[in-house]
Image: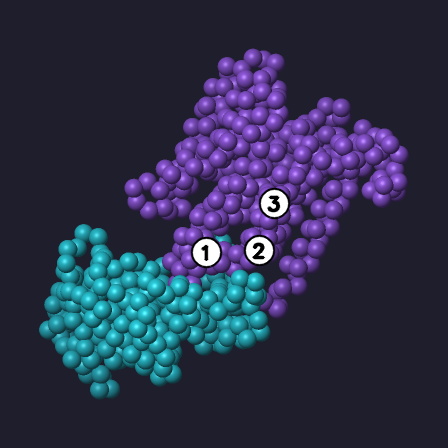
Amino acid sequence: MPATSRRPLSALVALGLAGLLALMVALSVGSVSMSLQELWAVLLGRGNALHDTLVFSLRAPRALSAFATGGLLALAGALMQVLLRNPLADPYVLGISGGAAVGALLAMLLGLGAVLVSGSAFAGALLSTVLVFGLAQGRGSWTPTRLLLTGVVIAAGWGAVITFMLTLSPTEKLPGMLYWLMGDLSYADSPQVAWLVLVPAVLLTLPLGRSLNVLARGPLQAAALGVAVKPLEWGVYGLASLLTAVAVTTAGSVGFVGLIVPHMLRLVLGNDQRIILPASVLAGGALLTFADTLARTLMAPEQLPVGVITALLGVPTFLFLLYRSR
Amino acid sequence: MSVLEARELVVDIPGRQGGDPLSARILPGQRWGVLGPNGAGKTSLLHTLAGLRPPRSGTVLVDGEPLAVLRRRTLAQTLAVVFQERQDSFPATVLETVLIGRHPFLSPWQREGADDVRLAHQALDALSLSTLKDRLVSTLSGGERQRVAIATALTQQPGIWLADEPTNHLDLHHQVAVMELLHQQAEAGAGVFLCLHDLNLAARWCDHILLLYPDGELCFGPADTMLVPEALERLYDQSLSVFTVNGKPVFVPA
């Protein structure tokens, strides 16, 4: 649309810059702060040894994990909202985080290491996905309402299991578990997997944008306009589930990013998925990177779970935008 | 120009056994009206013809190609559907909504070009929606939304129109405007197939009529042979008075 295309494009550029800024801040702020020049020197390979270690071994992996996780969650949320044609859907609405949490807590209870906790969380997320999808098929057809209800009920089931496990857990393990449940990037030191999933996912969804715009108007209208509805819906479901599973595996169940980021962008940028999907990735990444920087600096040396920060930032911003919108 | 053909088509209506098979061809330039009481299966027939629900038996063909082998995208380049019910879960402007009619013609990476926007503006003009183009569809009245749906189909430039009660919610003026528009489409070579509730609109604008009885019985033919009071009274289980205005029959419940 020539008349309206300039604003969304400049919005994407602005969000990209915000993302870069969030990453720069994340790299330079912490127990030892760096000036912009010092950071620049480190990035060019001319920094001192302490700064090198801080940036490349500690801050960069964590900041990049945060960015990728935020991007994954926001993209998954935007996709779920279109798939379920429900603006209240988020990446966790179908019980994926519940399944992941049960997997992770189980591994923690058994005293397994971080890698196994992640693996177990991922397995739980996939189990939940398959369970919801299989049960939502039922004996009849697959409708968004049915999928949503199945997901909500399965999520409630996982919630009960989680509470049960928390009551059984020894006291010394509880803080770690609670942090995981709120979302925590302290142990996210290998961002590679998240990026390896995020980048192809973005490239895959970009050409689907217009089809998703049509799908948002209901399956019949979409089919009448030439969209192969079932393959698209299954693909989107599978992709959103995978993105969520990877995000939850990286950082635990960080709330609000997947629900609020796509929504805020819709309020400001309209509802063209070709803009909303990439914008969600950038804004989600920037938000989570920024929130994680706050989480590890606000009460340093104590670290807050990043989910607390995303909620505290997200809730008022969202309510403000909603209040202002037509 | 395209031909829509039903061969021995039985629409799958839950809870109804049997029903007459339909074998008919909707030729370019023809304006078909489907009449029948509530629940007779008008919408189901329309959706089956559009390939949106599988028939119980028989086939639907577009230009001799069975729908089962046609890609949806290819089909959408010739056949447009105006639905009776619409879903707008997410806010969108009138112009954005009408532009999605170009979807079947664009490749995944392509954005709507100037030509597409021009077609959308023409469609908005044709339905007197130009002044509403930046409004959110969710803020429009029922009749305005109905016109947006028709404008979307018009932007699709279809060779075959399948419209489910296109005059729903419309005021008298816009009813006439929409029927006139569909008439023009037919004169330009499109096949038009409408489900209608208004006998008088059907009598005035349609040249072929299909009567759909609740038990699945059906009959069709040129409008003047089908629009006879006895058949219509049996169809609706309602006695009718007939007047003649400008050479066309006008039906009024007796």
- Name the residue that disc number 1 marks: A215
How far apart are the alpha carbons under marks 3 and 2? 12 Å
The chain letter under disc 2 is A
Numbered mark located on residue A206 in the image:
2
Image-based side of A1 in relation to A17, left or right: left
The chain in purple:
A
Sequence-wise first label, 2 or 1: 2
Same chain for the residues under marks 3 and 1 in the image: yes
Image quarter where the N terminus of chain A lies is bottom right
Image quarter where the C terminus of chain A lies is bottom right
The chain letter under disc 1 is A
User: Badge 2: how crowded within 10 Å, few (<14), some, or many (20+)?
Assistant: some
The quadrant where residue B63 appears: bottom left
The quadrant where residue A53 appears: top right
Residue B26 at x, y percent in the picture = 28, 75
- Name the residue that disc number 3 marks: A198
A301 or B235: nearer the viewer: A301
Sequence-wise first label, 3 or 1: 3
Same chain for the residues under marks 3 and 2 in the image: yes
